[in-house]
Amino acid sequence: MTVSSFRNELDSHYSPTINSEHCFFNTRLNSHAEIDLAFFARDVTADLLEADNKTVEIKDKGHTLVFKKQKDTVKYTFKNKKIIKMVNNDGNITLLNRINAFNVSRDGKLIVIRVTLIEKGGSYSKTIYL
């Protein structure tokens, strides 16, 4: 058996599995909502780690999360189906779009963020623990 015929035999035997796995990962990586949510979680975690004495406030019935740092105050606010980040009440950055619900609460020492995302005609919820 030559190397090329061996390779063709392997390709024909394993290609359906490889293709189906490849499609699964492509779907997961191409979900803009999942990618945006991962960046949001990273951003919130970084701000929490930089906050003075872990000073965190939850306002507006759980719709606003505030971190106080040495020089800055950072707010994450749910407004108009978006999560917006503001630094020192100046300017804003939209971090997440198409948000159906957003709630921040405390569970002991943990900060719990519940987000319901709208994507492809449906919605799904994610919970972030900090």
Image (cartoon, rainbow, N blue to C red):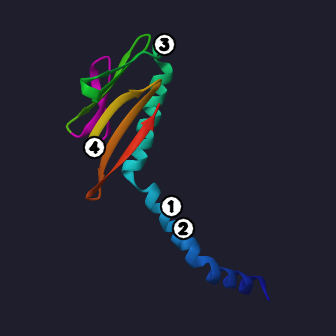
Q: Magenta-highlighted stretch: main secondary structure?
A: strand
Tell me if residue 21 comes above or below residue 106 in the rendering: below
Q: Residue at x 29, y 32 (%)?
A: 84
Which numbered dot is residue 53? 3
Reading the image, the residue beneath label 1 is 25
Measured in 3D between alpha carbons, the distance from the residue under mark 1 to the one under mark 3, in whole angstroms, is: 40 Å
Amino acid identity at mark 4: Ile
Tell me if residue 56 comes above or below residue 9 in the rendering: above
Amino acid identity at mark 3: Asn
Q: Residue at x 59, y 77 (%)?
A: 15
User: Is residue 94 at least partly visible in the picture?
Assistant: no
Closer to the N terminus: mark 1 or mark 3?
1
Tag 1 near tag 3, CB within 8 Å: no
Q: Nearer the viewer, mark 2 or mark 3?
A: 3
Quadrant where the N terminus is found in the figure: bottom right
Crowd tier of the residue under label 1, counting other residues whose Cα lies within 10 Å: few below 14, some 14–19, many 20 or above: few
Reading the image, the residue beneath label 2 is 21
Amino acid identity at mark 1: Phe
Q: Residue at x 50, y 61 (%)?
A: 25
Closer to the N terminus: mark 3 or mark 4?
3
Q: Which residues are magenta?
A: 81-96
Amino acid identity at mark 2: Glu
Reading the image, the residue beneath label 4 is 99
Is 90 included in the stretch rendered in magenta? yes
Residue 19 found in image quarter: bottom right
Measured in 3D between alpha carbons, the distance from the residue under mark 1 to the one under mark 4, in whole angstroms, is: 24 Å
